[in-house]
Each structure stands twice: as structure tokens, then as C-alpha cells.
Amino acid sequence: MQMKLLFVINDDEKKLKALINKFRLPFNVIMYGYGTASQGILDFLDLVATKKNILTSIIPNNLEKEIFNYLSNTHHLEDIGKGVAFTTPLSSSSKYVMEAFNQKEGEIVKNKSNYHLIITIVKEGYSEKVMNLAKKCGANGGTLLKGRGMGGTSSFKFFNMTIEPEKDVLLIVCQQENKNKIMEAILEKNGVNTDSKGMCISLPIDSMVGIE
């Protein structure tokens, strides 16, 4: 049975913990980020930056549909602004992970979704510039993560990449037809040879809810 990485982004941590408890998910990380509305819009509406909770969890393929139905009923992700949830396939996992779900590793199912997750890492302060470029190329929005050292070290790990302190990590879900032009636009203006020292990668999305 294929294992997948589940992402759920919303502003209610209690609901995320309820999801973890209901399905007894053993491998979970909750991070904190911010919505990518520009500061000008926030100032105009007299709002502060919206804090977001980002849950990443390893789930077996046979729980995916049930989890998405649960999220639709309890998190109301079909409503604009309530959040987004999606899964990406894992190419491999440790024996310990498989045994935790009493599963046997099987054939990897080919991705059939029309969406991708673009992960962009730039120096702190360049995220709004990156997001503006992405929106011009068809992106609807994104979620901003702030990198910081953990456990006395000067960096932390994200998807096996070392992220130095004072880095912005942008998560952008986009349609497949827009993926290449979004990444090209970002790297042209914010690549490793620019002041923002940026890089980006993309991951396929299998299933999702929360985007029209």
C-alpha cells in the first residue's frame, strides 16, 4: 500500500489535533506560517498577518478518502479562506513507518492530479516579491514559513534540505499548466545568483480540497 504525505493548512490547531487523534496518525509535525496577503492590503483593512497552522503527516493510501471526507465535513475547506489540504506521494519509506500502519509496501500509484506544490526558499524579506511574481503567473496564493535554528544548531531540516536562519519558505499550490512558468519567473528574479539567493522545487499532488 502506498504511503502519502498529508498537508493541512488552516488557522485552528485544535481541529488538527482532533484529526490526528481520530485517525490515530503516528507521524505528525505541526508548523506555523503566515498567509501571503501583502502588507498594503493588511494595513488597508486594519488587519494583522494571519497565522496559519501547517500539519504534515504520513498516512496510508487507504485512509486518504476517509480523511478528506472528514476534513470537508469538519473543517469546511470548500469555503473560501478556511484552509487547504492535499497529499503528495512518497517514493519510499522506512520499514518502521510501514509497520506502524501494519501495511506492506506495494506498487507506487502514478500521480493523476492536475496540481503541484512549489516550495520556494529565499532570504528573509523577499517572500512578498516572490509571491507577486507567482500570482502574475497564475498562482492564487501561498503560505509563508519562517526558518529558525532548533536544538542549539544554526539551521533546520525541511524535506532533507538545510535551511539557514532568516529564510522564508513559501508553499504555493498551483495548477500543472502554470507550474513551469511560475518557477521560471521566480528563479529568473530570485535565483541563487540574485540578492534573494532563492531556490525552488515542486512536488506532485495526488488529492486535495480547499481550492476551486
Image: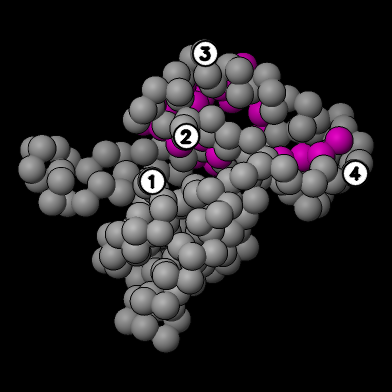
| In the depicted structure, whether residue 178 falls above or below residue 98 | below
Q: Secondary structure at mark 2?
A: loop
User: Which residue bears the numbered disc 3?
Assistant: 73
Say whether residue 194 is magenta. no
Magenta-colored span: 1-30
User: Going 52% across and 19% down the picture, which residue do you hit?
Assistant: 72
Q: Residues within 10 Å of mark 3 (few under 14, many from 20)?
A: few
User: Going 48% across and 71% down the picture, which residue do you hit?
Assistant: 184
Q: Secondary structure at mark 3?
A: helix
Are the residues at dot 1 and dot 3 in contact (C-beta closer than 8 Å)?
A: no
Q: CA distance from mark 1 to mark 3?
A: 24 Å
Query: Residue 174, how many percent across, how many down?
Result: 50, 49
**Residue flagged by tag 3: what amino acid is it?**
Asn
**Residue flagged by tag 4: what amino acid is it?**
Glu
User: Going 49% across and 47% down the picture, which residue do you hit?
Assistant: 173
Are the residues at dot 1 and dot 2 in contact (C-beta closer than 8 Å)?
A: yes
User: Which residue bears the numbered disc 1?
Assistant: 140
Mark found first going from the N terminus, 1 or 4: 4
User: Which residue bears the numbered disc 4?
Assistant: 107
Say whether residue 18 is magenta. yes
Could one spot residue 5 in this view of the protein? no
Q: CA distance from mark 3 to mark 2?
A: 15 Å
Nearest-to-viewer mark from 1 and 4: 1
Q: Secondary structure at mark 1?
A: loop
